[in-house]
């Protein structure tokens, strides 16, 4: 199983997953279809399906054009709001692409129909892969827009229970700011400090910080560490879902403060992508 990481838009990732024996490929979260098809052609693979994590424009907007360019392409996801959806998936459903197994995991919170995808191959030394969209980011998670804190906690707990060697391919490059927030939550966490130093170097070199692994995430991602005493102390809460809810609120304040520090840059990006009008939420 080969994964091509494809940066697009302001800070999104889409992915091409290739089964190297059959040269069959599936795409995840297609935002820029022509860019994807360039890579499909260069790799010499047959694109058979699109897995969409959720309906937001920056994860699904490329589906209609891709479906037009590739008639018969399967567009799969768990939310009827996904553009050009051909089949709605259910929690726990399993798919197969060549030797690659896909387990569909409904992970509501960011959106009510958010689906994450767990991929593996039998009898293969390579670790499995998780395509988590906005449910789980490197050192963070997406905003809780359509679900409750309890739902998001359950979603993250399910993802966090996957094998520690699982590679995490998320939907956005938010790692640096996520780690800066994680350091605020746990200033004495050496894993946060080391990962932040690493992420700053990656940012300077303009290279992706994905993938991480679930084992790593459990060491520095505060949203997977809601049972840890330093995180509970930071939020002043004890019940895991309450800790998560408080973390999300503090993360929103932290992000807002960061935006206020860079208003001109943020405004220019917003104008470039039309975000000052009525674009849907990320």
Image (tube, rainbow, N blue to C red):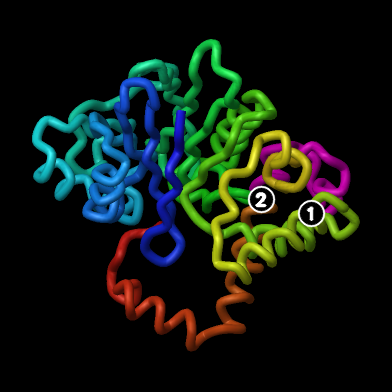
What x and y, as percent, mark residue 185? 79, 57
Residue 76, quarter of picture:
top left
Question: Which residue is pictured at 72% across the width and 45% down the height?
Answer: 243
Of mark 1 and mark 2, the one earlier in the sequence is 2
- Residue labelled with disc 2: 139
Residues shaded magenta: 227-245
Query: Is residue 110 found inside the magenta-colored segment of the image?
Result: no
Query: Is residue 239 found inside the magenta-colored segment of the image?
Result: yes
Question: Which residue is pictured at 61% across the width and 57% down the height?
Answer: 175
Q: Nearer the viewer, residue 46 or 159?
A: 46
In the picture, measured across the screen, residue 256 lies left or right of residue 34, that is right
Q: Nearer the viewer, residue 47 or 253?
A: 47
Q: Secondary structure at mark 2?
A: loop
Question: Which residue is pictured at 76% across the width and 47% down the height?
Answer: 220
- Residue labelled with disc 1: 192
Give the prevailing secondary structure in the magenta stretch.
helix
Residue 242, quarter of picture:
top right
What x and y, as percent, mark residue 51? 33, 34
What x and y, as percent, mark residue 6? 41, 52
Residue 34, quarter of picture:
bottom left
Q: Secondary structure at mark 1?
A: helix
Q: Nearer the viewer, residue 143 or 266?
A: 266
């Amino acid at each position: 199983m080969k994964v091509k990481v494809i940066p697009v838009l302001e800070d999104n990732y889409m992915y091409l997953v290739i089964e190297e024996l059959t040269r069959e490929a599936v795409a995840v979260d297609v935002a820029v279809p022509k860019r994807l098809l360039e890579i499909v052609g260069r790799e010499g693979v047959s694109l058979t399906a699109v897995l969409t994590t959720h309906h937001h424009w920056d994860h699904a907007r490329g589906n209609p054009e891709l479906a037009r360019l590739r008639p018969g392409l399967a567009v799969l996801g768990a939310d009827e709001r996904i553009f050009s959806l051909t089949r709605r998936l259910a929690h726990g459903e399993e798919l197969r692409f060549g030797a690659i197994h896909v387990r569909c995991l409904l992970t509501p919170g960011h959106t009510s129909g958010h689906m994450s995808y767990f991929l593996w191959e039998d009898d293969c030394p390579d670790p499995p892969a998780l395509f988590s969209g906005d449910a789980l980011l490197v050192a963070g998670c997406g905003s809780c827009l359509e679900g409750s804190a309890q739902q998001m906690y359950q979603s993250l707990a399910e993802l966090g229970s996957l094998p520690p060697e699982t590679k995490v391919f998320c939907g956005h490059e938010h790692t640096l700011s996520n780690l800066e927030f994680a350091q605020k939550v746990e200033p004495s966490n050496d894993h946060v400090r080391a990962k932040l130093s690493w992420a700053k170097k990656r940012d300077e070199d303009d290279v992706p910080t994905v993938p991480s692994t679930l084992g790593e995430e459990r060491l520095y991602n505060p949203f997977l560490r809601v049972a840890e005493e330093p995180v509970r102390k930071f939020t002043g809460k004890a019940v895991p879902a309450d800790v998560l809810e408080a973390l999300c609120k503090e993360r929103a304040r932290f992000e807002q403060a960061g935006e206020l520090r860079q208003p001109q840059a943020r405004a220019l990006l917003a104008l470039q992508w039309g975000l000052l009008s009525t674009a849907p939420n990320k």
